[in-house]
Image: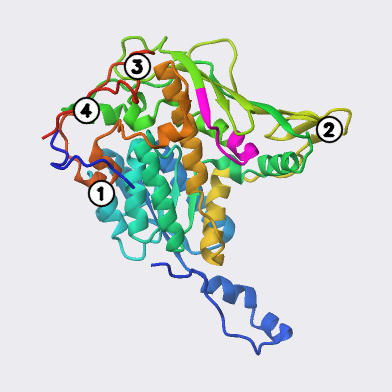
């Protein structure tokens, strides 16, 4: 695959957004007469957003952005979209975006063309996860604030790109939010604050579920090259989705990391490919992983996409003085139960509201480390299950094995439509990226 001649391993203008009004001599009465709040609103920086990846989640994130703008009463709109496939990019011409054809870009370079549209200052990244490290890097290099969907990498090298780029975003004063929307959800926020304040005592153990009651979608094989067939059916290839433990279950793992205020240091796991059988693709359809946090606290993780008579998407945490469903409930031992009863704004909208407010008020917001930590937590569990061995955090973070084409980690615009390797679904003891990595593909 003629991705790029060089096969180097990927490694990884702060301008204040605050606008000040010089009105020191204006009295309070005078300010009211001038309708001062409206003056402030007029002074806020217009938000000009692009969507990179106009699939189902990208379109949904764009609609969430539009609702956030409306809720806040700010000047904001989508001004361009980018997608690898022309038919997807053309969706930008339809409601609710209603863009002209020349602002609906397609191809590997589409995201760079969208970033170059005048006045763009807000990028929504909703591509398949395997493209996110390289595209996030491009957005920060271009000086854009970013909302990015989760997960944000598929392996250790991708995570390193994310961490390094997040540091660059902070240096430039850019604001970054991630699609781990529970961190923007009022009931989770209040409940976890109470856990941190000691409502259930010292944490003893945690549990995380994303257990579906049926299989995930499979789009079949469409395209002229292996790369196109993989991307059109992206969920089923490790370098593109990270497997479902990463693509879906990262939400629940993120909640556990949030509660623990850190990430696990080691994982053991198992799983299987049962219902997918001989369908094209590499991923598994169920995982069971045990994680260890600093201090010897363990979290038990289960995720699956197989037909069953029960399902659950939830988390639980047990402490020395009770337990909690961190979504909204605390059950202290012998104490007064708590259940969140307040209003909850749609968290998919709230996360954009929080990002826009951070831009306008120049308040700190950079969720790169949190979402990358949670992504790498999922990857660590995946590799533990794939290999049938324990995997440690530092071991994974330092790994140089890349599931995807090398150039995708640094400059996805340089990709071309040629062939790329397809792995066999991993078998424990036969698939180990540390001691027995799959062969590196030969590319032109």
Q: Which mark is residue 440?
A: 4
**In front: label 2 or label 1:** 2
Front residue of this view, candidates 23 and 325 = 325
Q: Is residue 210 left or right of residue 7?
A: right
Which badge, 4 or 3, is on the more N-terminal residue?
Answer: 3
Q: Are marks 2 and 1 in contact (CB under 8 Å)?
A: no
Q: CA distance from mark 4 to mark 1?
A: 28 Å
Q: Residue lying furthest bottom in this view?
A: 25
Label 3 sits on a secondary structure element that is: loop
Which badge, 4 or 1, is on the more N-terminal residue?
Answer: 1
What residue did someone put label 1 on? 110
Q: Is residue 362 left or right of residue 162?
A: right
Say which residue appears at 48% left-offset and 70% top-offset.
16
Report if residue 23 is visible in the image: yes
**Way the structure is coloured:** rainbow
What residue did someone put label 3 on? 426
Range shown magenta: 255-267
**In front: label 4 or label 3:** 4
Q: Quadrant of the N terminus?
A: top left
Return the x and y of residue 442 as percentages of the image width and height: 15, 29
Could you say which quadrant of the image residue 199 lies in? top right
Front residue of this view, candidates 270 and 17 = 270
């Amino acid at each position: 695959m003629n991705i790029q001649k060089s096969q180097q391993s990927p490694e990884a203008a702060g301008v204040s957004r605050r606008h000040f009004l010089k009105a020191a001599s204006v009295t309070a009465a005078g300010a009211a007469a001038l309708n001062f709040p409206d003056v402030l609103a007029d002074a806020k920086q217009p938000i000009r957003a692009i969507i990179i990846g106009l699939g189902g989640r990208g379109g949904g994130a764009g609609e969430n952005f539009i609702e956030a703008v409306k809720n806040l009463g700010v000047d904001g709109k989508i001004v361009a979209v980018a997608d690898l496939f022309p038919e997807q990019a053309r969706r930008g011409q339809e409601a609710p975006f209603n863009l002209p054809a020349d602002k609906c870009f397609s191809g590997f370079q589409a995201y760079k063309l969208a970033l170059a549209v005048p006045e763009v200052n807000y990028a929504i990244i909703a591509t398949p996860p395997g493209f996110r490290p390289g595209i996030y890097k491009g957005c920060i290099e271009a000086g854009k604030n970013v909302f990015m969907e989760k997960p944000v990498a598929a392996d250790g090298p991708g995570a390193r790109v994310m961490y390094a780029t997040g540091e660059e975003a902070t240096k430039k004063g850019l604001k970054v939010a991630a699609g781990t929307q529970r961190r923007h959800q009022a009931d989770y926020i209040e409940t976890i604050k109470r856990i941190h304040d000691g409502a259930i005592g010292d944490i003893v153990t945690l549990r995380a579920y994303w257990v579906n009651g049926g299989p995930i979608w499979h789009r079949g094989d469409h395209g002229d090259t292996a790369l196109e067939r993989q991307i059109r059916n992206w969920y089923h290839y490790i370098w593109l989705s990270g497997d479902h433990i990463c693509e879906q279950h990262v939400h629940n793992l993120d909640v556990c990391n949030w509660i623990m205020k850190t990430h696990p240091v080691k994982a053991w796991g198992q799983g299987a490919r049962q219902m997918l059988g001989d369908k094209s693709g590499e991923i598994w359809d169920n995982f069971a992983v045990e994680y260890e946090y600093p201090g010897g606290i363990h979290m038990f993780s289960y995720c699956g996409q197989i037909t069953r008579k029960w399902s659950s998407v939830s988390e639980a945490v047990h402490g020395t003085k009770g337990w909690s469903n961190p979504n909204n409930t605390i059950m202290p031992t012998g104490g007064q139960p708590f259940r969140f009863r307040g209003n909850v704004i749609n968290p998919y909208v709230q996360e954009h509201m929080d990002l826009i407010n951070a831009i306008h008020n120049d308040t700190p917001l950079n969720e790169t480390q949190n979402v990358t930590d949670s992504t790498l937590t999922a990857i660590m569990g995946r590799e533990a299950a794939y290999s049938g061995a324990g995997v440690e955090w530092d071991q994974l973070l330092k790994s140089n094995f890349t599931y995807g084409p090398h150039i995708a980690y640094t400059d996805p615009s340089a990709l071309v439509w040629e062939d790329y390797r397809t792995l066999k679904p991993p078998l424990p003891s036969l698939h180990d990226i540390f001691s027995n990595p799959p062969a590196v593909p030969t590319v032109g």
